[in-house]
């Protein structure tokens, strides 16, 4: 999947020195990328930082973008690397198991009010927190593949491109990620019931 | 078909990624199997949860910061643009590098292009010479001879020698491996050669693996000391590049790893590629995997060819972080009792590269008693990502990128106070297959019937016997210039202070993954489940005990762990245990 024409144009303009063109690329993908990164790390503050760093990095490395993949695919790769680096540098590799609600690190994410009842809203928040906690227990590669599939709605071929693995591996890994996520969700739910 | 495969199909069914025939099968299953329906429902429920994830907005403030930074960056870029354009190096990399070290001004791209061009010319000339001379053996008479001579002269590794026609034919296969991205005809010529030659040429591709992640009792291991400790291997690498890896020399992944196709691994049996013809790990293509797998299958008991260690290249994405870890290790008194690893005497200053199973790692980790954190440093990404990973530290992908980074690490550790450098390296194998690189005296290798067999490494137990290898941050041969790292002197000074320095890292992706899971992500699967994922050859009582020990390693306030390896985890093992998707289901769910 190659970059859409308008992306290609914006990239070309950016490379020609037009920072505003890059600004339009940012505007186009910033929220999507942030949403994905929010699922990759423990809080929105970190995700914002990662996206910010990733966008700057993308600008610097834009000349390396070949155009064979979509710009977002490439951008996600950059952001993922930034996220991994950040996780390491923050030495939170162990604390990933901790509560995602860490007020000292940006606080809980807020769920956009979509108009459901307060009960629904609460349940949804609980589900989200449960999911986030379960995701934190997964390996980074499992998180990544789940995010790409479930949040970015990428097909297996696109995922294979991002993760640089064969499509067959995407299928098996995704299955294992889901199986592991199921285990973690059940475990957390049991713990919550106690 | 096993249950897990049905679940995999159900997972893919949910995603609409099944073939029509598979879809029909799954729908039949779903109609008749309550468990299958539950599985589908649970996966669908997960999806629903994901859909409930909060919609977040990139803050306007952050957006402004991004735009301000890129604008500023672009402005900075304008100023030196003409100079940079002529130098041919990316501004991003340049900026980063200048901020990091003073060797950053070196322009890699033109150098690489030049190298590619030169190597290509050499290769063309070489082929012409071979044709003209009746296929003269390049490894025996070419640059490789230099390796052998120099290596022995410097007290380095003595390359094993092949003996039979079949061996040399297999050597051709080795050439095939090495030349995957180079000239296949060249490889074929070698196959047809039938002349005896040294295996050192074969091992030369193990450049990356050798230097950092020399495995237990392996060919690459035997070369490990050579790579880091002697110029010989560098010569070999150049020879290898000239022979085969040229095609990718300057273009990244394939070329980089093409030089690493033939490493020898004693312990790991990665035959998963037999089940995954599309396997491509770290630039090793499926054909290589298949050939390796066949070789391993043909002689499971011997040390056989494996691609496992070919992919090892140490490119820490944050040398400063590595440096900090090392500092911490040093500051926490890793000397004296309890830190002797695999026979290296305590208090002796060594850089220890450990290739070991998680179990063995656990033992080693448990001996590092004072440090307080576990940090996973993923050093192996697909090479295309190296530049990104390194965030500009590596301006151009180079064969010796790991060395450059190691030098940077050491430079950071020592805060630039070690102006002259030599580097001494040892590797310690795991599970009773220890080998101290500098002490390996060489071994005989045989190749027949598709199997490269290596004799067991002969460990003389004299680590000091290995040569030292000067280098500087640029990865160039050291001179007496003041900008070289005198790591050897530094290490010696540490030794005088009774301090030791250890690099600890498994070289095996499965091992790495296990440790990553257990220590880094805090996820400790049941030992039984874990063992199911292990290669059956490594499943034994001792390992069970060791895994238990690993599980007991504290995850918080634990220990520092510097892992050199890749994080492509148990994929291959798992795939091996599962039937191919195109195999008919047996209905054993």
Image (tube, coloured by chain):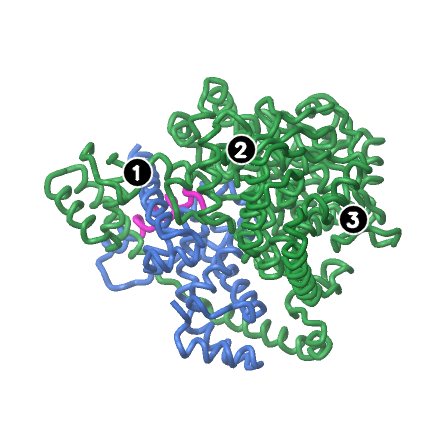
User: Would residue B416 be counted in the magenta stretch?
Assistant: no
Whether residue A70 is visible here, answered yes or no, is yes
Colour chain B is painted in = green
Q: Is A129 covered by the magenta stretch?
A: yes
* In the rendered image, residues at marks 3 and 1 fall on the same chain: yes
Checking the image for residue B448, the label placed there is 2
Q: Nearer the viewer, residue A6 or B305?
A: B305
Label 3 close to label 1 by CB (< 8 Å): no
- The numbered mark 2 sits on a residue in which chain? B
Asked if residue B571 shows in the view, the reply is no
Could you say which quadrant of the image residue A113 lies in? bottom left
Per the picture, the main secondary structure of the magenta-coloured stretch is helix
The quadrant of the image that shows the C terminus of chain B is: top left
Q: Which residue is mark 3?
A: B471
Q: Residues within 10 Å of mark 1 (few under 14, many from 20)?
A: some
Q: Which mark is residue B579?
A: 1
Q: Which residues are magenta?
A: A125-140
Element carrying mark 1: loop
């Amino acid at each position: 999947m190659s970059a859409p024409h308008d992306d290609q144009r914006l990239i070309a303009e950016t490379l020609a020195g037009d920072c505003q063109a890059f600004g339009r690329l940012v505007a186009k993908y910033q929220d999507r990328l942030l949403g994905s990164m929010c699922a990759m790390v423990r809080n929105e503050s970190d995700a914002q930082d990662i996206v910010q760093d990733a966008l700057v990095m993308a600008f610097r490395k834009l000349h390396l973008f070949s155009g064979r993949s979509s710009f977002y695919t490439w951008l996600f790769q950059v952001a993922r690397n930034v996220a991994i680096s950040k996780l390491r540098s923050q030495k939170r590799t162990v604390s990933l198991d901790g509560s995602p609600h860490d007020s000292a690190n940006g606080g809980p994410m807020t769920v956009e009010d979509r108009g459901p009842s307060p009960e629904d809203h609460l349940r949804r928040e609980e589900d989200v927190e449960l999911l986030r906690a379960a995701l934190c227990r997964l390996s980074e590669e499992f998180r990544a593949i789940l995010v790409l599939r479930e949040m970015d709605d990428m097909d297996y071929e696109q995922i294979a491109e991002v993760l640089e693995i064969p499509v067959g591996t995407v299928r098996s890994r995704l299955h294992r990620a889901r199986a592991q996520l199921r285990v973690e969700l059940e475990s957390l739910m049991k713990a919550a019931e106690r | 078909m096993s249950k897990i495969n049905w679940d995999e199909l159900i997972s893919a069914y949910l995603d609409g990624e099944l073939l029509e025939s598979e879809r029909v099968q799954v729908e039949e299953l779903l109609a008749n199997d309550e468990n299958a329906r539950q599985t589908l429902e649970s996966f669908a429920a997960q999806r629903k949860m994901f859909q409930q994830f909060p919609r977040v907005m990139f803050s306007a403030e952050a957006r402004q910061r991004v735009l301000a930074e890129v604008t500023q960056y672009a402005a900075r870029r304008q100023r030196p643009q003409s100079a940079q354009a002529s130098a041919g190096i990316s501004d991003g990399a340049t900026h980063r590098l200048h901020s990091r070290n003073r060797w950053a001004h070196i322009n890699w791209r033109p150098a690489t292009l030049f190298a590619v061009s030169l190597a290509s010319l050499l290769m063309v000339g070489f082929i012409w010479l071979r044709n003209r001379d009746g296929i003269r053996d390049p490894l025996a008479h070419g640059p490789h001879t230099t390796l052998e001579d120099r290596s022995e002269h410097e007290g380095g590794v003595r390359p094993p020698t092949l003996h039979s026609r079949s061996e040399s034919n297999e050597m051709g296969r080795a050439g095939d491996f090495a030349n995957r991205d180079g000239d296949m005809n060249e490889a074929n010529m070698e196959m047809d050669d039938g002349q005896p030659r040294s295996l050192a040429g074969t091992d030369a591709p193990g450049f990356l693996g050798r230097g950092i992640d020399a495995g237990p009792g392996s060919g690459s291991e035997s070369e490990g000391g050579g790579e880091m400790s002697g110029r010989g291997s560098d010569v070999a690498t150049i020879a290898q590049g000239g022979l085969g890896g040229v095609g990718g020399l300057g273009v990244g992944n394939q070329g980089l790893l093409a030089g690493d196709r033939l490493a020898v691994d004693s312990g790991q049996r990665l035959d998963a590629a037999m089940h995954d013809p599309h396997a491509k790990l770290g630039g090793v293509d499926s054909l290589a995997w298949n050939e390796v797998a066949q070789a391993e299958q043909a002689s499971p008991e011997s040390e056989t060819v494996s691609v496992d260690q070919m992919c090892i290249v140490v490119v820490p994405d944050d040398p400063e972080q590595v440096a900090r870890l090392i500092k911490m290790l040093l500051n926490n008194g890793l000397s004296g009792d309890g830190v002797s690893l695999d026979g290296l005497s305590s208090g002796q200053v060594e850089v220890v590269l450990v290739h070991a199973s998680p179990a063995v790692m656990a033992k080693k980790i448990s001996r590092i008693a004072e440090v307080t954190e576990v940090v996973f440093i993923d050093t192996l990404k697909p090479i295309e990502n190296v530049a990104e990973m390194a965030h500009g530290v590596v301006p151009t992908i180079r064969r010796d990128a790991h060395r450059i980074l190691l030098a940077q690490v050491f430079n950071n550790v020592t805060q630039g106070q070690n102006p002259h450098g030599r580097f001494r390296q040892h590797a310690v194998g795991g599970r009773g297959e220890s080998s101290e690189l500098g002490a390996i005296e060489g071994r005989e290798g045989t190749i027949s019937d598709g199997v490269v067999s290596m004799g067991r490494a002969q460990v003389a137990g004299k680590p000091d016997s290995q040569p030292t290898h000067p280098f500087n941050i640029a990865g160039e041969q050291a001179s007496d210039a003041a900008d070289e790292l005198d790591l050897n002197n530094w290490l010696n000074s540490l030794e005088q202070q009774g301090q030791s320095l250890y690099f600890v890292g498994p070289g095996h992706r499965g091992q790495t993954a296990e440790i990553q899971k257990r220590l880094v992500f805090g996820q400790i699967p049941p030992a039984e489940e874990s063992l199911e994922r292990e290669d059956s050859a490594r499943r034994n009582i001792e390992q069970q005990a060791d895994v238990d020990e690993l599980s007991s390693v504290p995850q918080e306030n634990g220990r520092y762990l510097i892992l050199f390896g890749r994080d492509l985890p148990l994929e291959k093992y798992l795939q091996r245990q599962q039937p191919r998707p195109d195999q008919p289901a047996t209905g054993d769910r």
